[in-house]
Image (spheres, rainbow, N blue to C red):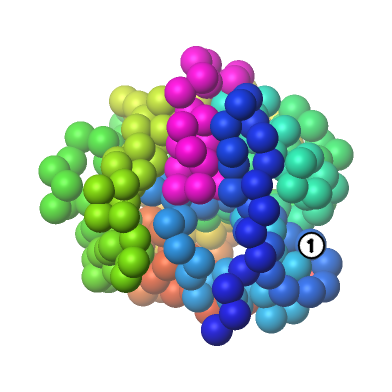
Amino acid sequence: MREPDTQTINLNGFATRIWRKGSGPKIGFLAGFGGLPRWVPFLDKLAETRTVIVPSLPGFPGGDRGHSVLDSHLDWVLAVHTILSEAGLAGADLAASSVGASLALEAAAIWPETVKKLALISPFGLFDDNDPPEDPWAQRADEVPSLMCHDPEIWKALKSIPEGANSVEWPIEQTRASEAAARIFWPLGNTRVAKRLHMVKAPTLLMWGEQDRIHPQSYAQRFAEGIAGKTEIKIISGAGHLAELDQPDAVANAILTWTA
């Protein structure tokens, strides 16, 4: 299997990785909780018919320590806007998961011209006291895999140290990714994006793992009701919070159909 092409951009003085693979119309992907320490089958499925561009978020694997200079939610949103522009994704379709999906929504709300169509997997950003999401930062490390994936072995494999990797640096990078996400969403995952959903005009597909243990399925309807543009909800069976890892073909096919 051919590895993706890799380039880096400079963001606030830190190198940020951009992966690129495939051919055809461009589609971006912003990763979810924990980021992407390695290329995954879901991205290969997208790359069969699209040019897939995957920027790392600051502090996530491939994002160095860029999160360390982002002191507010606005800083994060501006950083994502810059990353999308530098990656050549302005005006392209954008898929995103979990924490990345929340930031994709913010960019689509504030800069409508940035996104053509959105495909989002269980975004963070809303909080209902009567139906609260689970807090992944409050869990023991051994509980996290089953919170992220319906099949926890998939998460464990994603995070396992690859042959030849620095055994000291690798776990530090994975912990850094959780810290970076916490800077945006801890403790309640509430960015008050509800106030800005009416600004999202891009047609938006909302995908939810049927076994998502982070966000109740009711949140999909809450997002759909707030977004101004056309929305559709798709429940992915056999999938947890990061549905693209549990069911890569089903999620990729839904995205490709939506953005066709």
Q: Nearer the viewer, residue 161 or 241?
A: 161
Task: Identify the residue shown where x is 41% and y is 35%.
Answer: 181
Q: Nearer the viewer, residue 145 or 55?
A: 55
Task: Identify the residue shown where x is 14% and y is 53%.
Answer: 142
- On the image, which quarter does residue 253 sit in? bottom right
Residue 250 visible: no
- On the image, which quarter does residue 161 sit in? bottom left
- Magenta span includes 58: yes
x, y percent for residue 240: 35, 62
Q: Is residue 161 above or below residue 35?
A: below
Q: Amino acid at mark 1?
A: Lys
Which range is magenta? 55-75
Task: Identify the residue shown where x is 75% and y is 68%.
Answer: 51
Count of number-bearing discs: 1
The kind of secondary structure element at disc 1 is strand
Residue 91 visible: yes
Quarter of the image with the C terminus in it: bottom right
Lateral position of residue 112 relative to residue 28, left or right:
right
Principal secondary structure, stretch drawn in magenta: loop
Q: Is residue 53 above or below residue 103?
A: below
x, y percent for residue 78: 67, 25
Q: Which residue is mark 1?
A: 26
Other residues around mark 1 within 10 Å, as few (<14) / some (14–19) / many (≥20) = many
x, y percent for residue 168: 25, 48
Quarter of the image with the N terminus in it: bottom right
